[in-house]
């Protein structure tokens, strides 16, 4: 479908139909196919599958997740899906960035001021329950995502499920 040749309401309807046909589809793929932002597609999920928190909660949410142990950190762009396993370490604001340094492969500098919304996502993906915290910018693009880890049998870690659900309940 050519996004330039269709009205916004047609693109929205087509994306809803794509999600209805494949409810566990990749949000970014559905968005790209229909000329929408990933955040617009995420908003189409059934009630309860995505709970939004304000951008002002960025540091509080990050800090909470530093106590979860090893997580899966994903950055998904049109060119790469970068996956990194490790614990989140404490960050601090400085020089216009949220700076993350410590004993973890997850580190760097995040432009936290670009975050406009944070979503707690609980949905089926590839036939299994998936839990993530997704950070969105004003354009509706995912800055990054933090996922609850799985064990060797591909089951979600029970202690992280409890922590995810408790943190999400803060914003529900």
Image: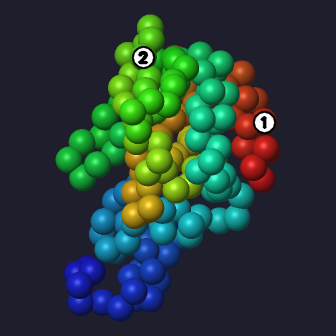
For residue 73, say whether it is visible.
Answer: no
Task: Looking at this view, name the residue that lies furthest to the top.
Answer: 103
> Residue tagged by mark 1?
166
Choose between 124 and 94: the one closer to the eye.
94
- Which residue is pictured at 47% across the width and 47% down the height? 113
Choose between 168 and 32: the one closer to the eye.
168
Give the percent coordinates (x, y) of residue 52: 65, 56
- Which residue is pictured at 52% across the width and 18% down the height? 89
For residue 114, say whether it is visible.
Answer: yes
- Which residue is pictured at 71% across the width and 58% down the height? 48
Q: Specify the quadrant of the image occupied by residue 80.
A: top left
> Residue tagged by mark 2?
101
Q: Residues within 10 Å of mark 1 (few under 14, many from 20)?
A: few
Q: Earlier in the sequence, mark 2 or mark 1?
A: 2
Q: Horizontally, is 124 left or right of 40 in the view? A: right
- Mark 2 or 1: the one toward you: 2
Give the percent coordinates (x, y) of residue 170: 79, 44
**Disc marking residue 61:** none
Q: Horizontally, is 65 left or right of 158 in the view? A: left
Q: Residues within 10 Å of mark 2 (few under 14, many from 20)?
A: some
Q: Secondary structure at mark 2?
A: loop
Instruction: Check the image and report above or below for 101 versus 64.
Output: above
Choose between 169 and 11: the one closer to the eye.
169
Give the percent coordinates (x, y) of residue 136: 47, 53
């Amino acid at each position: 479908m050519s996004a330039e040749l269709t009205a916004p309401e047609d693109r929205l309807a087509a994306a809803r139909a794509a999600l209805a046909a494949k409810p566990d589809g990749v949000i970014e793929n559905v968005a790209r196919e229909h000329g929408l932002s990933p955040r617009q597609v995420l908003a189409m999920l059934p009630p309860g599958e995505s709970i939004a928190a304000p951008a002002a909660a960025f540091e509080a949410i990050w800090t909470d997740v530093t106590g979860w142990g090893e997580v899966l950190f994903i950055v998904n762009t049109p060119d790469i899906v970068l996956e990194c396993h490790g614990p989140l370490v404490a960050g601090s604001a400085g020089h216009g960035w949220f700076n993350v340094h410590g004993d973890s492969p997850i580190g760097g500098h995040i432009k936290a001021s670009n975050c406009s919304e944070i979503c707690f996502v609980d949905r089926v993906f590839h036939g299994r329950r998936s839990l993530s915290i997704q950070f969105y910018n004003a354009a509706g693009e995912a800055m990054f995502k933090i996922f609850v880890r799985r064990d060797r049998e591909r089951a979600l870690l029970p202690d992280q499920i409890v922590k995810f659900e408790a943190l999400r309940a803060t914003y529900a």
